[in-house]
Image: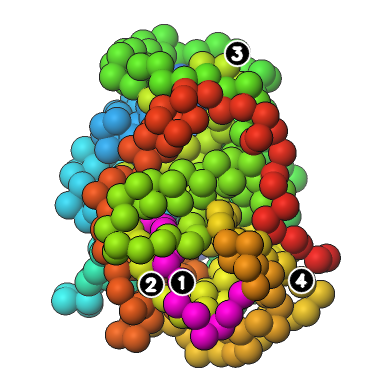
Amino acid sequence: MKLLKLARTLCISASLSVAMAGSVLAADFSKLIILHTNDTHGFDKHENGSNGMAVISQVKKDLKKQGYDVLLLDAGDAIQDNNLVNFSKGKSAIAFMNAAGYNAATLGNHEFDYGQDVLAQRIKEAEYPYVSATVFVEATGKTLVPPSVLLDRKSGKIGIVGMTTPETQVSTTPKNVYGLRFVEKKELYKTVQKEVDSLKAQGAELIIALGHMGSEDGCMGNRSDDVLANVKGIDIFIDGHDHKVKNKTINGALLVETGHYTKNIGKITYKNGKWVGELIPFGAYKTEDKAVADLIAKADREVKASLGQKLGTSSVTLSGARDPGVRTQEMPLGDFCADAYLWQARQANVLKGPVDIAICNGGGLRETIKAGTITRGDLVGVHPYNNQMYVAKITGRKLLEVLEAATSSLPDAMGAFPQVAGMTYTVNTKVKYQPGKKYPNSVFYAPAKPGSRVTINSIGGKPFDPDAVYTVSTIEFIAVWGGDNYGGLTGRDAKIDIQSIGYVDEETFENYLVTELKGKIDERYAKSQNRITIIK
């Protein structure tokens, strides 16, 4: 009996010890703070409304000094757009993020803009992991980067699963993603669920989805909202891609996003048993990490020395705003861009005949041209992709299809939105877009009935003829690869003829400004020129 009583006592003591150990080892997120960014696009200097990497670094340092366990995460599109990082093909962006102390990041669509070889080098340079569970190498069936990472922090085990929008297939030049497969919709949900379950099986006590997905209706089925509605076990979803500010709950998970260009720094804390998101806006935190600020200043001087040559002046400001802006309506910047395309193609005359129209996708216009001095860097900032210029002969029917598809999301913003020269057209958004077959290697669908929403009013001042052949000037991204929603221009019978004109987009802008406009953007671009009518 004494032995039995002793055994029972030992069992009870052991059980208590296990329970006490469990309570000691249980996650405590009360001192965890998650800082996050998305779509920084190289706006890493503290100026013009952008907090910049030196402020982000100092916020993290100050919170750590206060005893917090601080995670710093990025939801993609960090290495491309602003000249500060374009000049080095994103190498400087990685250096800034290393210095700021990032803990993980996911791949945005614009991480692919310099090609896969450069991306591989940038990932190698990063002192933090890149994760994405949704991008696969077709030849191996494995993910391009690790699908997730499990971080063993003093506050607990944290699993981070990455996601990259399948829209990447059409929002970067398609040759940049050859050999890669981006999972969509049901396969997307299944893939992410599998990774979440795996992280939990490894002991993750907090699951963070780090996704570059967005919430725009044009990506229905592939949005962050759709993932959260169809995947169980995600606690926090840090989003990017659509440049919106978000702070809401879906299916029990917190969905947050900061906007873009480091205008806000995201901050997530655990309060009263739930995750709470807030923003640190520009101006709220003015102290910079000096070492990071010095690193950025050095890179900035190098870029300005190269791109600071004065090319002309402007008496007006040409806004590069997205929505409302170049992705939703005719804008003076779009008129300027399309006029430059048309002028340069006519000067080159490679197809030995008239060039009728020009199309410039609104998503390719990245910055504003401010009134005052215009430098080479200003023009490169507007069009940073170094795209070859092309002319292509297409039928009027094909042109109508292209315009119908490229405006399919209106009145919601769309990167494909056609800013034009040499023509006028109308979009009736009261008529619902009717999708037909899906374009190859795209997330977009051809129009079932071209002309149901779009009317081409005139070309070259003459009535539109669907049976006529028109010559269009545009960039390689559109003419050759069918990027954005221009999949109608790909395929064997899409184009009658096509030819490079021997210039890249930035050269076209520069030549048009210096030669045709005599170095002066004047009042003709003070307002849009009634080329596009949107019926709402």
Which numbered dot is residue 429?
Answer: 4
Q: Quadrant of the N terminus?
A: bottom left
In the displayed structure, 36 sits above or below 394; it is above
Q: Earlier in the sequence, mark 3 or mark 1?
A: 3
Choose top left, top right, bottom left or bottom right for residue 319. top right
Q: Earlier in the sequence, mark 3 or mark 4?
A: 3
Which numbered dot is residue 285?
Answer: none
* Numbered range of the magenta stretch: 464-475
Q: CA distance from mark 1 to mark 4?
A: 26 Å
- The reply to whether the magenta stretch includes residue 20 is no
Residue 269 is left or right of residue 142, and the answer is: right
Give coordinates of residue 492: x percent, y percent. 30, 85
Give coordinates of residue 69: x percent, y percent. 49, 33
Helix, strand, or loop for circle 3?
loop
Q: Are marks 2 and 1 in contact (CB under 8 Å)?
A: yes
Amino acid type, callout 2: Lys
The residue where tag 1 is placed is: 470
Give coordinates of residue 456: x percent, y percent. 65, 72
The nearer-to-camera label among 3 and 2 is: 2
The nearer-to-camera label among 3 and 4 is: 4
Amino acid type, callout 3: Lys
Which numbered dot is residue 286?
Answer: 3
Camera-side residue: 533 or 478? 533
In the displayed structure, 244 sits above or below 167; it is above
